[in-house]
Amino acid sequence: MTRSPAEITRGQAVAVVGAGLVGSGWAIVFARGGLPVKVFDAQAGVATSALRLIEEQLGVMHSAGLIDDPGSVLRNITVAATLDEAVDGAAYVQESVFERTDIKRNAMEELDRVCGSQTIIGSSSSGIPASQFASGLAIAPRVLIVHPVNPPYLVPVVELVPSPETAPEAIEFARELMESLGQSVVHVRKEIEGFVLNRLQGVLLREAWALVEDGVATCEDVDKTLRDGLGWRWSFMGPFETIDLNAPGGIRDYALRLGPLYHSIARSRDQTRAWSPELMDEVERQRREFLPLERLGERRAWRDRVLMNMAANRKKERT
């Protein structure tokens, strides 16, 4: 029988340290699961502003049929004035500070000072392994990467990446907690820069930028290829299942038929070529033709509405 978040945390709260877009998203995930959440940010006023944004998002989620009672979810979230207050009695801490090794190390040193001896700490790091900012601390066996896709309350995948010092019990706790909250857990077995998600995304982005740089396609045509082609299948199945279904004899048949083509494509590319300033200027110019800079916020809101509709449809399919 699946345990509830409250059973896993034994009635304790969770703390979110860092109240930017990612931290705010995590607060919604935990609060939606019925957990009391304490949010802290070292910058004055950030956590309070985040609470207002969370309230707005909960209203939109309610309109999309993703939650029944926005008020009850919001009441699970409180702003902590200090880090000590945020982590006091917490079973789990989700660290979501700025993505820089020195800043994360400072945050871990502070958590090392104030956290209880049983508290598990997940970092929202997008690509920096935990060993680079938690190694040698007393809390290191209880620290692992718990990397979401933003916003985590709409996109369920989460990567769990232990460091060599992470205890198996910490990994199991994080896995059970995330699954109980409805997240889709990917267990990355060992540390690697970028983990799984960003390494896959990085390969795709490298080719996308190269196609534009070489004059093969515009940004919009590359986006169309994903949006109106590959993305349709990839929105509900992964690359291995996709190719398994795309050859009469399954995945081995596909590999024998098209493996040489993909190998030739890979060999045709300089894998170390950086995105030059000139290329960045050209891509920026093309994107701004389709979306003026002042409309980025409006487009992000549109993206979230589309994700909410997709999440609502998936929810219906599961019931």
Image (cartoon, helix red, strand yellow):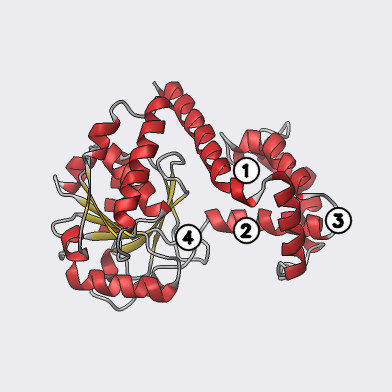
Residue extending farthest to the front is 294
Across and down, in percent, residue 29 comes to: 33, 42
Q: Nearer the viewer, residue 68 or 225?
A: 68
Amino acid type assigned to the residue bearing label 4 in the image: Ser
**Closer mark to the observer between disc 1 and disc 2:** 2
**Residue 112 in view of the camera:** yes
Side (left or right) of 202 relative to 65: right
Amino acid type assigned to the residue bearing label 3 in the image: Gly
Q: Which mark is residue 126?
A: 4
Going from the N terminus, do you reach mark 4 or mark 3 first?
A: 4
Across and down, in percent, residue 10 comes to: 14, 46
Q: Secondary structure at mark 2?
A: helix
Amino acid type assigned to the residue bearing label 2 in the image: Gly
Q: Does residue 69 lie above or below 99 as drawn? A: above
Residue extending farthest to the bottom is 136
Q: Residue at x 22, y 64 (%)?
A: 83
Q: Nearer the viewer, residue 245 or 161?
A: 161
Across and down, in percent, residue 47 comes to: 30, 55
Q: Which residue is mark 1?
A: 239
Q: Nearer the viewer, residue 45 or 178?
A: 45
Mark 1 and mark 4 residues within 8 Å of each other at the beta carbon: no
Q: Quadrant of residue 54?
A: top left
Q: Residue at x 76, y 64 (%)?
A: 279
Q: Which residue is mark 3?
A: 215
The CA distance from mark 3 to mark 1 is: 27 Å
Q: Quadrant of the N terminus?
A: top left
Amino acid type assigned to the residue bearing label 1 in the image: Pro
The CA distance from mark 1 to mark 2 is: 15 Å
Q: Which mark is residue 202?
A: 2
The CA distance from mark 4 to mark 3 is: 31 Å
Side (left or right) of 264 relative to 80: right
The CA distance from mark 1 to mark 4 is: 21 Å
